Amino acid sequence: MNPPEPKLSPGEGFTRLVEIMARLRAPGGCPWDREQSFDTIKPYLLEETYEVLDAIDARDWDGLAEELGDLMLQSVFFAQMAAEENRFTIADSLEAINSKLVRRHPHVFADGDAKTSDDVLRRWDEIKETEKVRPKGLLAGIPRSLPALVEAEKISRKAAGAGFDWDSITQVFDKMREELAELEQARTAGSQDAMEDELGDLLFVVVNIARFLKVDPEQALRGTNSKFRRRFAHVEKGLEAQGKSPREATIEEMESLWQEAKHLESKLHGV
């Protein structure tokens, strides 16, 4: 039996990926790859990003290693298409990120000073503002295409950095109670537009509570979604053992199994 080939170094492996992508896109390469465009590949970039997040949530390290490779492929794919149009190459992308990391970490690569994470973030934003001619307005550089929770966190953090912020989290909780009352008023009035508006205000305040607590709201919600999936799967399994489906069960039966799932999770985590 021949010994396995030695693993390529990161640089060699990345070069090999670039070569493979170029071959797939070249004449005589893969028909599917050759047909793709920037717009047709965009959905795959999003899909691979969320598969990376799923692997992290599951602490599936082998899966994460594979998914990171899939995500890396998307960058190489876009760069290859750009190179074919003489716009830029993957080398330009690598040079851009390497230079940016060095430039925005003067406390590491130069004589800058940053003692805390907040200092680092503030300095990062200050340097970023000097690098490019950006649309006027503090929030203009934050893409509207971001997921709503992510956008809300970024614009609230940017505004807070400019001094437009509550003094304490107690004030944010007061604001949340105010928005809840306004949502209830909109519900009582029966105005769908007003309810949507007030619910958006409430969600925005919740994002700010997360910011004060230094909790990532997107990750927090993903964790709750995962928890709900687990517990509801337990409910379905329990009902199946009784020969029932959720539609055939009473709310009391489902709630009992839900509480059982919570109890089992508590025991598992020693709570």
Image (cartoon, rainbow, N blue to C red):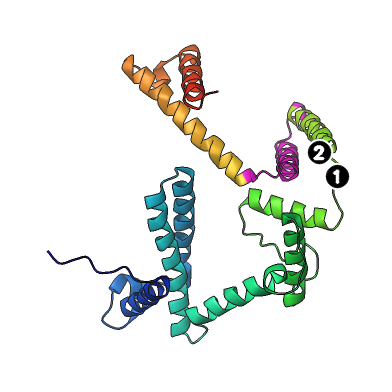
Would residue 110 be seen by someone viewing this image from the given angle? yes
Q: Assess whether residue 101 is covered by the magenta stretch.
A: no
* The C terminus lies in quadrant: top right
Amino acid carrying mark 1 in the image: Trp
- The dot on residue 14 is none
Locate residue 237: give its quadrant.
top left
Q: Main secondary structure of the magenta part?
A: helix
Q: Are marks 2 and 1 in contact (CB under 8 Å)?
A: yes
Residue 133 position, x and y percent, is 75, 77
Badge 1 density bin: few <14, some 14–19, many ≥20, Cα 10 Å: few
Nearest the eye: 75 or 245: 75
Relative to residue 234, is residue 15 depicted above or below? Answer: below
Identify the residue under disc 1. Answer: 166
Q: Quadrant of residue 113?
A: bottom right
Q: Compare residues 8 and 75 and report the one nearer the observer.
A: 8
In the picture, the disc for residue 169 is 2
* The residue stretch that appears in magenta: 188-217
At numbered mark 2, what does the secondary structure look like: helix, strand or loop?
helix
Q: Secondary structure at mark 1?
A: loop
The image quadrant where one finds the N terminus is bottom left
* Image location of residue 41, percent across then percent down: 44, 66
Q: Nearer the viewer, residue 14 or 257?
A: 14
Q: Give whichever of 193, 149 is nearer the camera.
A: 149
Residue 37 makes an appearance in the image: no
Is 197 covered by the magenta stretch? yes
Image position, residue 6 (x, y; %)? 28, 69
Residue most extreme to the bottom = 86
| Identity of the residue drawn at 47% across and 69% down | 75
Q: CA distance from mark 2 to mark 1?
A: 7 Å
